[in-house]
Amino acid sequence: GQNIDQPTEMTATEGAIVQINCTYQTSGFNGLFWYQQHAGEAPTFLSYNVLDGLEEKGRFSSFLSRSKGYSYLLLKELQMKDSASYLCAVIQAGTALIFGKGTTLSVSS
Amino acid sequence: DTGVSQDPRHKITKRGQNVTFRCDPISEHNRLYWYRQTLGQGPEFLTYFQNEAQLEKSRLLSDRFSAERPKGSFSTLEIQRTEQGDSAMYLCASSVDTITGELFFGEGSRLTVL
């Protein structure tokens, strides 16, 4: 089975940087995804990591350490529209994507 | 619109009734997934298909739930003898036929069981 942990809630202010952590325990690891989900909407893809290291995409970056079973999503220059739930998800060989419970980020002015 | 579409978007039913949801994936996507999501939780995996073959079904899934993808295109998810605990958002997603294909989600079908 898989176990995925991430904080339930986080708060930050506009313009700041926030790091959302995710730890996982799994076998046959085939990659880790981050999705963003605004309230009442479907999840949308943010990033995918399969090798150790940092992947940068605009204001968002995602880091993976396979040996530690650890990832983080880094959001820079926060905007109000970044208020959403951020979902960490892991894929094993031969199975579907399994999601964590999500981290609700609230950005205030 | 060439995204994933789901129907109906909202369904209110009485306990004990059967309900069916439909999902039309992105046309070139071979994989189709069903997830269930309740408030404050991440999507919970239910089942997935590669073309018409159902490759995996969650062990947590009651036998009241059944899914089909008869021609490898659209899929249906049926819940028989609904219970109040079935109230949730049912999300469908599709992806290309690779292990690491990005999932594209539909807007979901919200079920309320009274």
Image: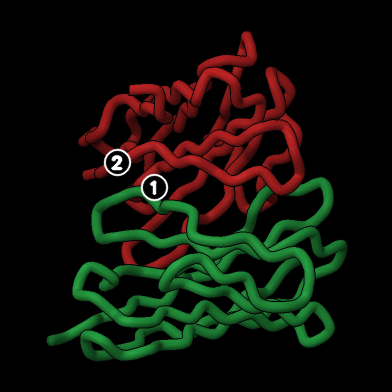
Three-letter code for the amino acid on which mark 2 is drawn = Leu
Q: Give the answer, above or below, for where A42 lies relative to A64.
A: above
Q: Residue at x 47, y 27 (%)?
A: B78
Q: Give the answer, above or below, for where B95 lies relative to A6.
A: above
Distance CA(mark 1)–CA(mark 2)? 7 Å
- Closer mark to the observer between disc 1 and disc 2: 2
Residue A62: x, y in percent? 58, 74
Mark 2, residues whose alpha carbon is within 10 Å: few (<14), some, or many (≥20)? Answer: many
Q: Chain A is drawn in which colour?
A: green
The residue pinned by badge 2 equals: B111
Name the residue at the front extreme. A58
SS at mark 2 in the image: strand
Left or right side of B45 for A28: right
- Chain to which the residue tagged by mark 2 belongs: B
Q: Residue at x 49, y 60 (%)?
A: A46
- Tell me, yes or no, if residue B13 can be seen here: no
Can you say which quadrant of the picture contains the N terminus of chain B? top left
Residue A100: x, y in percent? 55, 69
